[in-house]
Image: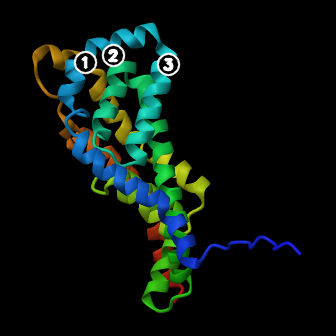
Amino acid sequence: MTDMPQTQHETPSQNNFMRRLPLIVIAVVAILGAIFLRDYLTFEALSDNRETLLAFRDANYLLTVLAFVAAYVVIVAFSLPGATIATLTGGFLFATFPGFLYNVTGATIGATAIFLAARWGFGEKLGARLEGSEGIVKKIKDGIDENQWSMLFLIRLVPAVPFFMANLIPSFLEVPTRRFVFSTFFGIIPGAVVYTSVGAGLGEVFERGETPNLGIIFEPFIILPILGLCVLAALPIVIKAVRGKKGL
């Protein structure tokens, strides 16, 4: 009789490692990127290479768009330094429109990659634990679940929330992928339009030998409309809270 081959099954520890491998890769690449790419993804690098970039764009527009979006996806997906510079570059190369669309598309795809990696790694397990918990933790979880749309738009609209955290938080809360993609794409448009428009004016900035005003988003004529959108996003939460108190 011949020996039958033994079927190897993954142990729980091996399975956990494989599920967390994408996050491990992202973390390692992010660290390496912060060390080795911080001098390349800068405003100075964009200024030094602006003529070459413009010439390549004029000769290969579609290829430039595809390469730019792909680079933006990699920067966001691996949390590399230079996301702001990438947004400015989108405006510099493609103007405010359609530049902001390219920026938003690349950022959304990259954010979705992190979201899926985090949810696959430990988000589903953590979400199940939160769902099975009791007391205040369960109430917080239920409150977020009841207002997912509002919460998702809020964390995208509020400038104080780091983009990386806005990608991770939903992965812990069992947010559907389609809802995450939709809220990310439309939620980051206001900020993307502002920074893309700054990038569109970089030609004059380069000629004057200056640096762009990245704090423009906190100017009253910019931040007040964004805060207005935040209020609109938070309105359903407030209404539900008021109705809940009245029902007590």
Point out the residue furthest to the left here. 209
Residue 148 appears in the picture as rendered: yes
Query: Image quadrant for the N terminus?
Result: bottom right
> Relative to 140, is 37 above or below?
above
Residue at position x 28%, y 39% from top? 82
> How far apart in space, not on screen, are marks 1 and 3 (Cα)?
18 Å
Point out the residue furthest to the bottom here. 135
> Relative to 80, is 6 above or below?
below
Of residue 112 and residue 219, the one placed in the foreground of this image is 112
Which amino acid is tagged 3? Leu
Residue at position x 37%, y 34% from top? 193
Which amino acid is tagged 2? Leu
Name the element at disc 3. helix
Q: Is residue 7 left or right of residue 94?
A: right
Q: Residue 238 location, x and y as percent?
A: 44, 69
Name the element at disc 1. loop
Residue at position x 54%, y 85% from top? 247
Question: Which residue is label 2 attached to?
Answer: 53
Residue at position x 43%, y 47% from top? 77
Q: Residue 21 location, x and y as percent?
A: 48, 61
Q: How many callouts does the rendering have?
A: 3
Question: Which residue is label 1 attached to?
Answer: 49
Which label sits on residue 92? Answer: none
Question: Which residue is label 3 attached to?
Answer: 63
Residue 209: quarter of image: top left
Q: Are marks 1 and 2 in contact (CB under 8 Å)?
A: yes
Name the element at disc 2. helix
Which amino acid is tagged 1? Asn
Q: Are marks 1 and 3 in contact (CB under 8 Å)?
A: no
Residue 234 appears in the picture as rendered: no
Of residue 77 and residue 28, the one placed in the foreground of this image is 28
Residue 223: quarter of image: top left
